[in-house]
């Protein structure tokens, strides 16, 4: 860990802009082996850097330790919660199971939050930590879910596998770029053609479970799951509790982990642990996609092994040359 904190890992993202892990930015959780790497991302035309946190699986340096699915999560309207107990436990639980998980800090108006989410996703996809990731789950807490839904519908990446919304603010009005204020947040859901997980508090007046069910017909997604959190408000707090209770945070993390794991293993069509509120026959492209994915994984591993053999051989040759010299 000390040796990692003595270097500054930097990678190119796009258009001459990059991202880097800050000095002394690597922290290893001794309880589960998860590494939390604080990174800063360069933004075009700005001197201010975007701060993000990459939660890395244990032994992430070993081939195959990071799973095929990665996760990017947005905080809600309170930006300071990005490193709060709830988001940290979500990221840690996912990373401990092998899933690269990225979160970020972005106070400000929604238009800026949309741009920053997209830049974070770009930085995550191009990072060396995502070498084994080929599919992404994006989502967020509260209005962060709306941000993810908006970005996902317009995203340049074509490998958004699913969405996870924790307390989606269904009936919350919000400002629309170059337009009048939208009366609710439903429209973004009508553009998602991928599996969705809703985790809705039953005391949230902006996003009740009944409200989600009432707009299902407007969602093109062929697989929608919903878990209702009993006794929680929109911030997943119980009555008279200033913050989400430990058992609430654990349930959120376990539910997210089950959803992501089902995607990873292609078990979602047969998953019964997460209540399905909308389903259609398994898309005909599903089996073909699974076959192509497995073939791509095998090809990727062959390339990685070949590169490693070449690097080892080159190092042996360099050592020989040094001995001769």
Image (cartoon, helix red, strand yellow):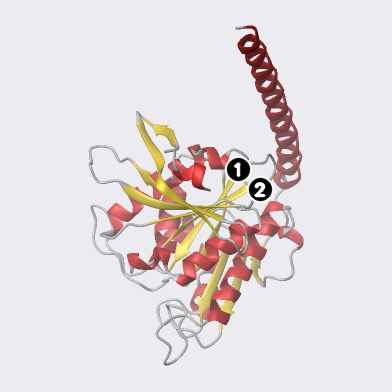
Q: Secondary structure at mark 1?
A: loop
Taking the image as shown, residue 307 lies to the left or right of residue 193, namely right
Q: Residue at x 71, y 39 (%)?
A: 293
Residue 318 location, x and y as percent? 62, 14
Which of the marked residues, 2 or 1, is nearer the chain's N terminus? 2
Residue 3 to residue 137: above or below? above
Residue 10 location, x and y as percent? 42, 35
Taking the image as shown, residue 317 lies to the left or right of residue 111, namely right
> Residue 66 or 270: which is nearer the viewer?
66
Q: Residue at x 42, y 64 (%)?
A: 83
Q: Residue at x 63, y 63 (%)?
A: 257
Q: Residue furthest top?
A: 324
Image quadrant where residue 324 sits = top right
List the residue tagged with mark 2: 67
> Residue 322 or 135: which is nearer the viewer?
322
List the residue tagged with mark 1: 133
Q: Secondary structure at mark 2?
A: loop
Q: Inspect this view and state whether residue 225 appears.
A: no
Image quadrant where residue 321 sits = top right
Image quadrant where residue 31 sits = bottom right
Residue 9 location, x and y as percent? 45, 37
Q: Residues within 10 Å of mark 1 (few under 14, many from 20)?
A: many
Mark 2–mark 1 distance (CA, rounded to whole Å): 6 Å
Q: Residue at x 38, y 35 (%)?
A: 18
Q: Are marks 2 and 1 in contact (CB under 8 Å)?
A: yes
Residue 131 location, x and y as percent? 59, 38
Q: Which mark is residue 33?
A: none
> Residue 99 or 140: which is nearer the viewer?
99
Q: Residues within 10 Å of mark 2 (few under 14, many from 20)?
A: many
Quadrant where the C terminus lies?
top right
Q: Inspect this view and state whether residue 247 appears.
A: yes
């Amino acid at each position: 860990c000390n040796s990692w904190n003595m270097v500054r890992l930097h990678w190119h993202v796009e258009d001459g802009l990059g991202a880097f892990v800050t000095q002394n930015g690597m922290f290893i959780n001794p309880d589960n082996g998860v590494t939390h790497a604080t990174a800063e991302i360069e933004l075009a035309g700005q001197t201010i850097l975007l701060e993000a946190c990459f939660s890395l699986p244990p032994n992430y340096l070993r081939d195959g330790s990071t799973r095929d699915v990665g996760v990017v999560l947005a905080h809600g309207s309170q930006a300071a919660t990005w490193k709060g107990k709830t988001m940290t436990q979500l990221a840690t639980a996912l990373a401990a199971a092998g899933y690269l998980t990225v979160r970020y800090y972005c106070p400000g108006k929604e238009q800026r939050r949309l741009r920053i989410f997209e830049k974070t996703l770009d930085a995550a996809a191009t990072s060396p930590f995502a070498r084994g990731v080929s599919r992404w789950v994006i989502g967020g807490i509260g209005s962060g879910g709306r941000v993810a839904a908006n970005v996902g519908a317009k995203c340049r990446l074509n490998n958004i596998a699913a969405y996870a919304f924790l307390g989606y603010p269904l009936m919350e009005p919000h400002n629309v770029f170059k337009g009048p204020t939208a009366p609710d947040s439903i429209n973004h859901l009508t553009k998602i053609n991928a599996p969705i997980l809703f985790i809705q508090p039953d005391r949230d007046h902006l996003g009740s479970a009944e409200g989600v069910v009432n707009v299902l017909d407007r969602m093109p997604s062929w697989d929608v799951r919903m878990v209702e959190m009993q006794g929680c408000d929109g911030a997943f707090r119980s009555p008279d509790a200033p913050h989400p209770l430990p058992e609430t945070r654990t349930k959120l993390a376990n539910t997210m982990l089950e959803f992501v794991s089902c995607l990873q293993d292609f078990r979602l069509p047969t998953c019964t642990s997460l209540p399905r509120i909308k389903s259609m026959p398994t898309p005909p492209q599903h089996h073909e996609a699974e076959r192509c994915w497995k073939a791509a994984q095998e090809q990727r591993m062959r390339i990685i092994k070949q590169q490693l053999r070449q690097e080892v051989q080159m190092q042996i040759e360099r050592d020989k040359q040094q001995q001769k010299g």
